Amino acid sequence: MLRRLSVVVLVLFACHTSARRHENPPAQRIVSLLPSFTELLFAIGAGDRVVGRTQWCDYPPAALSIPSVGDGLPPNIEAVMARRPDLVVLYNAGPNVTAAKQLERAGIQTVLIDLNRLEDLGPAARTLGRLTGREEQAESLAIALDSLAGRPPPPATTSLAFVVWDNPPIIIGHGSYLDQLATQAGARNVFGDIAAPSAQVSLETIVARDPQWIAVLSDSTVPPAFAKRREWRAVRAVRAGHFLLLPGSLFGRPGPRSGNAIQQLRARLAR
Amino acid sequence: MKWTLLVILAVLALALSVVLGPAAVPLGELLRSDIVWNLRAPRALLAFLVGGSLGVAGAGLQALVRNPLADPFLLGLSGGAGLGAVIAIALHLSGPWALPIAAFIGALAALGLVYRLGLIGGASLDPRILLLGGVAIGAFAAAITTAIVSLADAAELRNAFLWLWGGLSGASWDSVLLVALYAPIPLVVLLAASRPLDLLALGEEPAQYLGADVERVKRRVYLAASLLTAAAVAVSGVIGFIGLVVPHIARLTWGHRHRSLLPAAFLGGGALLAFADTLARTVVAPRELPVGVVTALIGVPVFAFLLKRWTIA
């Protein structure tokens, strides 16, 4: 009896400590392992506490002066620990789960956050607000982001296909953030019927679905090399040179600038 | 009878791959459709030429190294081609043909190195040394490839593997023309070596006694088969199983005489790849399967069935 009681007490105690851990004082030294998280942290006014970022974190410009801990895929644990963080923010995916466990074992608080689509932005902002003690700023940002995600899309006036890779052709399906971006900007993704975030398709399917635009994430100002390939010229939008070249920093990631990205895409489609 | 059946199978595979596809093209408009003329027809022909080339290259190499496990990619060519492709992407080489050309050069470099290893210490293309050299060079190239992929910045590098693992999405009349002009040369060289290849099956010494110029035959077969494979990998990536399974199927049905074995491997390989590509394009439409998955899924059961019949008989 006594033994059983002591087990209960132990369990209660364990619960109590784990609950207390969530009430940690606001994080002071944060390593952010996804560009979107870095942008969110700056947007809620916790940017000055970010002490490590990935090499892809290029916005806001102030982020560039923070030391990089590498590409973050998967995270380099030693490089992260060398920044002596009290909080590491990771994107919730396979290799990162293992990395988070390793960091926790070393006594560093971690948080794994889902961030795949527009509707993940609000919750992500709130989580980061809670962990940094910037609840108020995070809440007002989250409300704006939630309303962006919940907004009924405008009627589609044009159509596009997002081409991620040309050989084999990989396109963006309904499950992706880019599909939401297009829909909110008033363009129908011709592959919106494919549930997956991305999929390999035949070139003739692209020809048959005849999008008005071919959208490509690219920092370049010239159409991608495949535009010159003979088989791709069977696609009407390719022949017409209707390429949307979208810089990855603004368009390639959900973040506090998603509203801006939608506006810019809409403006470019109207041109 | 066997030949008629094989030719019918080949024609059927080609016809199906022109008629069937994820986009609905009414039968009546087949001849006027842009999709059929500019995409399906060149893709069907390229599949046939690549499949046939891989079949013949596999048959030739299996005879040369006297090892039933030999496959056109075993001798390091896929590793070399992959390295070439990844370097092209990492260096941001642009241009519509940058990737195929870089892959071709990579495959040739691997071929040259393995060939050189095969001659080390007067080994004169000893099959064992060729196999070991091929595996070693392939592993070395793969290691460098992985190092580049994990160190370089280009986000597109991840996709280099997709390209490398094969597919006929890059088919156009340009690539068909290229292969149609290039492939006949090594194909004729291999076919001309039919008789000495038959003798080689008896072992190098007996072949020598029976009048075959063993050194020359080995050199020619090795270079011709490798050059065929290098072209195939440049236009369609690494498509597995055709070069391994088709020669065996052909051998089980046509016997060991290379004069009939090689043409049968060409027609069989062509038919199998054209058919597999049709399935890859249509079964999960609008999505597409990597064609290498389909060649393995068809090739291996057929192979197992024949192997069973063969061992029982």
Image (spheres, helix red, strand yellow):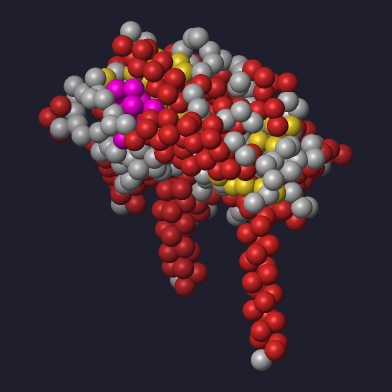
Q: Is A24 placed left or right of A240 in the picture?
A: right
Residue A36 in percent (x, y) is at 56, 31
Query: Could you say which quadrant of the image residue B84 lies in?
Result: top right
Residue at the (43%, 54%) spot, across then down: B297
Residue B116 in percent (x, y) is at 78, 33
Residue at the (34%, 52%) spot, across then down: B2
Q: Which residues are magenta?
A: A179-192
The count of marks equals: 0
Camera-side residue of B232 and A261:
A261
Residue B1 in view: yes
Q: Kindly give the residue lying farthest to the left in the view shown.
A: B28
Residue B279 in percent (x, y) is at 34, 45
Residue B230 in percent (x, y) is at 58, 31
B43 part of magenta stretch: no
Residue at the (37%, 32%) spot, across then down: A147
A188 part of magenta stretch: yes
Camera-side residue of B4 and B111:
B111
Q: Kindly give the residue lying farthest to the bottom in the view shown.
A: A1
Q: Is residue B190 above or below residue A236?
A: below
Residue at the (68%, 49%) spot, across then down: A24
Q: Is A152 placed left or right of B187 in the picture?
A: left
Camera-side residue of A254 and B252:
A254
Camera-side residue of A118 and B58:
A118
Query: Could you say which quadrant of the image residue A162 lies in?
Result: top left
Q: Is A213 placed left or right of B187 in the picture?
A: left
